[in-house]
Amino acid sequence: MTLLTARVLDALPRAVFVTNVDGMIIGWNAHAERIYGWRHSEALGRSVFELLALADRFEFTAPLMAGVLDGKPWVGAVSVRTSAGGVRRMKMFLDRFQGADRDPEGIVGSADDMAEVQILERSAIELTDHLLLALSAGELGTWRWETDSGAITWDIATETLFGVAPGQFDGTMEMYLSCVHPEDRETVLASVAEAVASASPYTVTHRVVWPDGTVHWVQGRGHAIVDANGDVSGTIGCVGDVTERRTAELHAQARVRSAERYAGLERLQRERLEFLTSLNDITIEATDHRDLMARVARAAVPRLGDWCAVHFLHRPDTIPVTEVAHVDPQKVSWLVGLQSRFPFDPDSAMGVPAVMRTGVTEFIADLDETLLQMVVDASPDIEPQFLRQVLDELGISSAISVPLRTKAGVIGVIQFVSAESGRKYDHDDVSLAEAVAGRVAAALQNTWLSDSQREVNAKLQAALLPSHLPRIDGLDTAVVYKAGTGMVGGDFYDLFHVPGDRWAVIIGDVCGSGPDAAAVTGKARHTMRAAAMHGFDHFDVLVWLNDALNASDKGLFCTAAYATLERGEGASWIFTSTSGGHPLPIWQRSDGTGEMVGRYGTILGVLPTINATVEKVTLGPGDTIVMYTDGISDVRPPFALDDTALLELVRLAADGAHAAAVIAANIVDSVEAVLPMSRRHDDLALLVVHVDDNGTLSAATAPGSPSPPS
């Protein structure tokens, strides 16, 4: 590699290595030295597999590199080893480079440290939370100053605070200083300079002179922005008018009242900010959009009102779904029972329909007699005396109804109602309600879209799986399939009769998701079924599937297990299985002991030939076989389950259970207690076979098992 090429590589802002077609490193830039720890001289001539790859990671293997040399660029997250023996998570891109004859001469790989990317993402989140804080506090403006260009950015609220007409601030330091009172300019500049020098936050209070000559006090709170090199690149912050407070400080008589007022405002702002912050946790913990709605409503009571209702419109021209909360659950039940008496009228001139239709907040500061009569008049389809009786019993004193607005439009309404407490809402409460609605709307829309995607995935997956399981005398079977949050996955299973009075059981998992994975899933299941029906033995069934995957052009691989059940002596059954890289079946005996059956074989669709062993065990009455996909155990730490934990989970699920459906349900409940499906990206498939406890004939499957996805 030429000196010029080496210098070019060193100039790149990311780790770069170059290998020849055999995987030997022939190029290694300075950033790679910093990231991986090996010097240029140590890396050259070494195998990239020896230097970087981890033995227990699949991504960084010879087949993957071979695919890149064949013209298939690859990008993804990988774990690599450093010279110090540690592991770093990298976002890596691999592509080949060609010679003059267009034949591949090697591979170029570039990578960024995932931790650095996450730092940038956290910075963006912190900036967003800062802006939301300014908005929720009310009457605050935001600004930003860039040291390199000297440009200053103000929002409209800041222009107003400085007496500048909207859009008229020219973004220069000269115009900013011209607005500052002459006696305060030196103090302001010194505060900013000190913050920049120390990269620390600062607070500065000063006067501004408006064009009409009036003097106002403002307080700015800001902090320095530090770039990736640790250099200060500017400042960012918010500013608010403090004229009243500063004036009060000059008058001894008003000082105490002013202090009490501002203490109350700060307490209220803190409580509001705490509530807004809690919405982040609510969004993360919610299992679906209805659960999110219910959690938001419960969290708002009684902090923001005696009642809170969240109304969500799935699609236009439909009836919205509603979740209501009150400190008294009996009142919630009473109100829900009234819904049949109060049908939703999309054309109503007041309330939820009007807000949903117009997208305009409805604020009732004081529900007096005149407004009560307007509510009655706006509901001609409801008997007036009955409606008035209900309104009197509710005892509403004040109410705020805010549209839930996203880029797609108004998707619902959130209501805060004051009743028993007698609280009267003000415009600050309206601002808070609108801030809450802004947070809830996006989260609700995203959660509903995830729910909808999960439902679609389940339906698509159902087309790839058997519609029902056969009945087998002497065995009880159950199956569970649950879709993760990603696209349609690659889990598959089957149970069917094969020659020789045997029953075949297959389960597998195609790598990846989406249409390609779905296509390979169908091919994998039917290939194994065809091989089994032709009477091939266990190993050859896996060979058939391996050959079919290698012959396809999808570039996907899978794991699979193939097993058979045949009657033994008395009430026993012979269970014979083999695994192609798939999680091993769990044999849970009736005496409470359990073990994994067999040994892991070669993953299918990667190599032209495979290795796999065949294991045979004898099942007695009350014994259970559990076959599953890695959606159960292979999740992010600390939720992952090792073999010991999984065996214990199955033991507890089978303890005292005498039906496959019960055991399957217990396993799923335990798995979801570790990490709910709403937070699992991968699908989960589970097939349970239970030998009848008494050795008598039994032919039951899990309730609902003919419709596998759930």
Image (cartoon, helix red, strand yellow):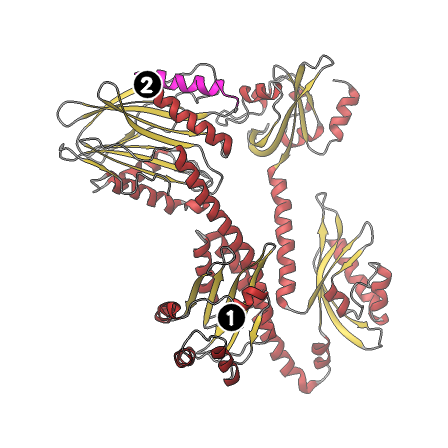
Q: In this view, does 132 lie above or below 660?
A: below
Please identify the residue farthest to the front as the structure is shown: 381
Mark 2 nearby-residue class (10 Å; few <14, some 14–19, many ≥20): many
In this rendering, the answer to whether 703 lies above or below 26 is below
For mark 2, what is the residue? Answer: 538
Does the rendering let one see residue 90? yes
Q: What element carries label 2?
A: helix
For this orientation, the residue located farthest to the top is 101
Write the start and end of the magenta stretch as one range: 535-553
Residue on which the image places disc 1: 348
In the displayed structure image, the side of residue 169 where residue 573 appears, left or right: left
Q: Earlier in the sequence, mark 2 or mark 1?
A: 1
Tell me if mark 1 has few (under 14), some (14-19) or many (20+) residues whose alpha carbon lies within 10 angstroms of its own. some
User: Residue 347's x, y, as percent?
Assistant: 52, 68
Three-letter residue code for mark 1: Ser
Left or right of 231 in this view: 386 = left
Residue at image x 62%, y 45%?
A: 119
Q: Is residue 676 left or right of residue 665?
A: right
Q: Is residue 27 above or below residue 465?
A: above
Mark 1 falls on what kind of element? loop
Drawn side of residue 71 relative to residue 199, left or right: left
Image location (x, y in percent) of residue 56: 48, 27
Q: On the image, which quarter does residue 203 sit in?
A: bottom right
Dot in front, 2 or 1: 1
Please give the name of the residue rendered at 80% of the width and 68% of the height, measured from the top-left corner. 165
Instruction: Report the disc number at residue 87.
Output: none
Say which amino acid is labelled 2. Answer: His
Q: Based on the displayed image, in which of its 4 quarters is residue 204 positioned? A: bottom right
Q: Which residue is drawn at 49% across and 40% down?
A: 486
